[in-house]
Structures are given as C-alpha cells and as structure tokens.
C-alpha cells in the first residue's frame, strides 16, 4: 500500500470507522463478468476451442481483460496447445481415467509384454496433431 493510502485509512479509523469494506462509489457497476456474458463466452468456446481471447473479445464486443477474467476465473480454463481446456477434471473425466487404468492393469496381467509396446508420458493429453492447423492457430 502507498503511504498516502495508509494515512487515509488511519484518518478514517481515527474518526471512528470500524470496518474495512470499501465505501460505495458513484458510477455504473461492472457488468462484463455478469452471468449473461459468462454464458456467451462458454457457448462460443464450446463451438470452437481454438478461439483466442482477442477473437472472443471482438466477436462478443467485450474487452480482452474481461474475456480473460471470465475464461480463467469463471470457466476455470487455460490454454493448452492453442486450445482452451478446463483446468480441473470433471467427475466423468476422472471416472474415465480410472476405468482406463483398471483396463490396462487387467491387460498387463494377461499380456506381460504389453508395456514394451506402449509409449507413456506425463499428464499431457494429446488430442490431435495437425502441424498446419497449429501454425494457423498461433497467428
């Protein structure tokens, strides 16, 4: 906090103020992150996950800052290889992972050499690999 802000708050508390909530201010409240706009961004992203923040902002006539806030804070998404993807797995996705792991475990018990023919990695999900499309989406 700046020194001037500290002095201002000190004066307010000295004059009898007891809470730290901001006073109401004149002006229109921010409506860009309203539920209506969150739904509009969600619908647009569901139609095409390759859209960037700038294109979404232009399409919906919102600022890039508000679109970025909606995507990160309200929709819990992040950019993964030119696509916007959820940060947290849904229950269906978790269950799907559990069932795939159980199936692989059963197959390894039946076919002990199965792991010799598998390529493994970390938590990266590779949806599709189309280098031409990725180059186009980076622009």
Image: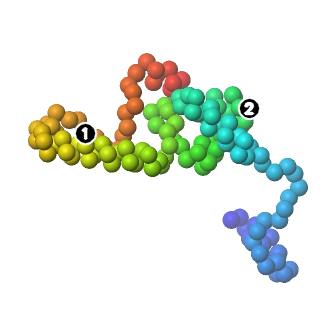
Name the foreground residue: 97 vs 16: 97
Name the element at disc 1. Answer: loop
Q: Estimate the spatial distance between the alpha carbons at disc 2 and disc 1, rounded to whole Å.
A: 43 Å
Disc 1 designates what residue? Answer: 120
Q: Where is residue 4 in the image (x, y as percent from the top left)?
A: 77, 66
Q: Is residue 9 left or right of residue 122?
A: right
Q: Position of residue 111 (x, y in %)?
A: 12, 39
Q: Is residue 51 in view? A: no
Q: Name the residue furthest right.
A: 26
Q: Name the residue furthest top.
A: 132
- Which residue is at 50% across, 26% downward? 138
Residue 61, disc: 2
Quadrant location, the N terminus: bottom right
Q: Earlier in the sequence, mark 2 or mark 1?
A: 2
Q: Is residue 95 left or right of residue 44?
A: left
Name the foreground residue: 20 vs 107: 107
Q: Is residue 95 in view? A: yes
Task: Tell whether label 1 touches label 2 (CB within 8 Å).
Answer: no
Name the foreground residue: 114 vs 2: 114
- Which residue is at 16% across, 43% downward? 108
**Image height check: is 78 above or below 1?**
above
- To which quarter of the image does residue 106 belong? top left
Q: Where is residue 53 in the image (x, y as percent from the top left)?
A: 61, 34
- Which residue is at 40% across, 48% downward? 94
Q: In this view, does 55 lie to the left or right of 128?
A: right
- Which residue is at 25% across, 43% downward? 103
Q: Position of residue 95 (x, y in %)?
A: 38, 48
**Image height check: is 130 above or below 19?**
above
Quadrant location, the C terminus: top right
Near mark 1 (Cα within 10 A), the count class, few <14, some 14-19 or many ≥20, is few
**Image height check: is 89 above or below 62?**
below
Total numbered labels placed on residues in the image: 2
């Amino acid at each position: 906090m700046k020194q001037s802000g500290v002095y201002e708050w000190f004066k307010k508390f000295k004059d009898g103020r007891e809470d730290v909530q901001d006073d109401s201010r004149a002006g229109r409240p921010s409506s860009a992150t309203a539920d209506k706009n969150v739904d509009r961004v969600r619908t647009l992203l569901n139609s095409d996950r390759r859209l960037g923040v700038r294109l979404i902002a232009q399409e919906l006539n919102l600022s890039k800052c508000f679109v970025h806030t909606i995507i990160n804070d309200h929709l819990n998404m992040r950019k993964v290889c030119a696509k916007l993807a959820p940060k947290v797995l849904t229950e269906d996705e978790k269950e799907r992972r559990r069932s795939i792991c159980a199936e692989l475990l059963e197959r390894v018990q039946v076919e002990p050499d199965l792991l010799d023919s598998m390529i493994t990695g970390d938590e990266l999900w590779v949806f599709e690999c189309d280098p031409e499309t990725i180059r186009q989406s980076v622009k």
